[in-house]
Amino acid sequence: TKSTLSVKSYGTTTNPIRILHNRIWGTRHSTITDANINSDLGACIYFSAGNTTSEYQIFQNNICMDAECGFATLNGNTTYASWIGNLLYGIEKFYSATTSYVFSSDALASGEIYLNTVIACTDTGGGWVRLNGAINKDIRGNVIINSVAASGTASSGTQIDYNVYYGS
């Protein structure tokens, strides 16, 4: 299937996009491509505004499980996104030709990932968070249980601290 929730819009400082209290499961990578459907990561929540700058999103208190990818921001610039207090369980690679991530933040600049719980995300091929040159990200206070480590390297302005790892 395509990503369950695919956001193609942006908010403002006074009216951010809020994705709150959702229960999402079973998403898978898609290899279908035609004029109307593009290949997708199979993310629970996918943020892509094409070539425009996407700003001011809050993803909070969501549960994502049994999926190929948790949250992803790809294609275009995404700034001021907050991923807070989410529970991600059993995020893993189901399709051998892909790499899966719990949080894929390649296009995220000036964002925060904190107070999330990641459980049993063991075979992603990627990591619980994909950094790949992360700039101005605040990644703190996450609990990682029996899951893979972060992947990639952080760049200037990124703080990664106070995360707790159990059996990881």
Image (spheres, rainbow, N blue to C red):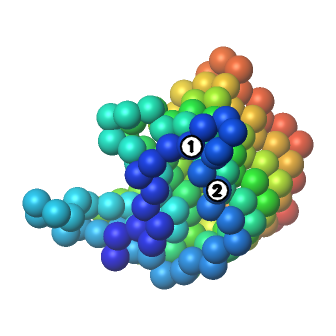
- What is the crowding at mark 2: few (fewer than 14 residues within 10 Å), some, or many (at least 20)? few
Query: Is residue 128 visible in this depiction of the protein?
Result: no
Q: Are marks 1 and 2 in contact (CB under 8 Å)?
A: yes
Residue 19 x/y as whole percent:
62, 61
Residue occupying the far front of the picture: 14
Question: In the image, is residue 138 above or below residue 42?
Answer: above
Q: Residue at x 45, y 48 (%)?
A: 9
Residue 67 x/y as whole percent:
51, 74
Q: Residue at x 21, y 64 (%)?
A: 37
Left or right position of 122 against 31: right
Q: Residue at x 23, y 59 (%)?
A: 38
Q: Helix, strand or loop at disc 2? A: strand
Q: Residue at x 44, y 32 (%)?
A: 53
Q: Nearer the viewer, residue 3 or 31?
A: 3
For residue 137, which numbered disc appears in the image?
none
Q: Nearer the viewer, residue 83 or 9?
A: 9
Q: Which amino acid, by three-letter code, is at mark 1?
A: Gly
Q: Which quadrant of the view contains residue 93?
A: bottom left
Residue 147 x/y as whole percent:
69, 63
Q: Nearer the viewer, residue 42 or 58?
A: 58
Q: Which amino acid, by three-letter code, is at mark 2?
A: Arg
Q: Which quadrant of the view contains residue 116?
A: bottom right
In the rendered image, the quadrant that contains the N terminus is: bottom left
Residue at which label 2 appears: 18
Residue at which label 1 appears: 11
